[in-house]
Image: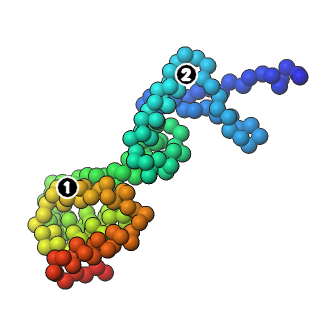
């Protein structure tokens, strides 16, 4: 063997952001290999990173484990979790901010319009609940905070049933028909 083939190539490790140490890989013949940390600091960073990522994965319900397992560092994993599960809260906070800004400029928006805008802005997984709430009489007087809190109670259900919509549509129909009111679901 010549001396060039036995040399080890050291790649620089980027400084971690928010405690996240990147996993350094090198493509060899189209395959990625993990280059082990060499210094004590690198080992401590990697250990911290693995603990953070593992803790985040363990906090997820079992049915979501495989969806998030592909994220290799805690920072991107946390962002993906926030994107997936924090949608209703983010929508609520953005709408609250817009309403406050409009009120500072003297604009007054009817409560029913605010509530309808909030319901329309939710993702497709919320369809069953938005149909129910759009047709309730109290939508005109309910505050945005109350509407948000009512919907928040269904968040775990929405997260768990996003793939099975048939049963949820039946529940929506039953909920709506039990009010004995005419319902426009178009």
Q: Are marks 1 and 2 in contact (CB under 8 Å)?
A: no
**Residue 131, image x, y percentages:** 27, 72
Residue 64 or residue 131, whichever sits in front: 64
Can you tell which mark lies on residue 149?
Answer: 1
Q: Residue at x 37, y 66 (%)?
A: 124
Disc 1 element: helix
The x and y percentages for residue 101 are 20, 54
Q: As drawn, is 53 to the left or to the right of 106?
A: right
Tell me the residue at 18%/76% (across/down).
178
Which residue is located at x 27 percent, y 76 percent?
A: 173
| Residue 88 appears in the rendering | no
Element under label 2? Answer: helix
If the image is split into quadrants, where does the N terminus sit? Answer: top right
Kindly report the distance in space between the C-alpha atoms of the residues bearing marks 1 and 2: 44 Å
Q: Is residue 164 above or below residue 156?
A: below
Note whether 122 is above or below 166 in the view shown: above
* Residue at the farthest top position: 40
Which residue in the structure is indicated by mark 2?
42
Disc 1 crowd rating (10 Å Cα; few below 14, some 14-19, many 20+) is few
Specify which label sits upstream in the sequence, 1 or 2.
Answer: 2
Q: Quadrant location of residue 141?
A: bottom left
Nearer to us of marks 1 and 2 is: 1
Q: Residues within 10 Å of mark 2 (few under 14, many from 20)?
A: some
Residue in the picture at 28% in, 79% down? 185
Q: Quadrant of residue 91?
A: bottom left
């Amino acid at each position: 063997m010549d001396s060039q083939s036995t040399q080890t190539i050291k790649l620089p490790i980027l400084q971690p952001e928010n405690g996240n140490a990147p996993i350094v890989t090198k493509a060899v013949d189209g395959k990625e290999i993990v280059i082990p940390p060499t210094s004590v600091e690198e080992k401590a960073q990697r250990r911290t990173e693995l603990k953070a990522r593992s803790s985040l994965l363990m906090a997820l319900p079992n049915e979501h484990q495989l969806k998030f397992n592909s994220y290799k560092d805690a920072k991107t994993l946390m962002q993906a979790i926030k994107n997936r599960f924090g949608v209703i809260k983010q929508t609520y906070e953005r709408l609250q901010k817009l309403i406050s800004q409009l009120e500072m400029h003297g604009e007054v928006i009817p409560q029913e319009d605010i509530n309808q805008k909030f319901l329309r802005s939710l993702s497709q997984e919320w369809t069953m609940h938005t149909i129910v709430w759009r047709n309730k009489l109290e939508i005109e007087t309910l505050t945005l905070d109350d509407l948000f809190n009512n919907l928040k109670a269904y968040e775990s259900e929405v997260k768990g049933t996003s793939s099975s919509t048939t049963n949820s549509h039946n529940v929506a129909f039953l909920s709506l028909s039990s009010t004995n009111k005419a319902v426009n679901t178009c």
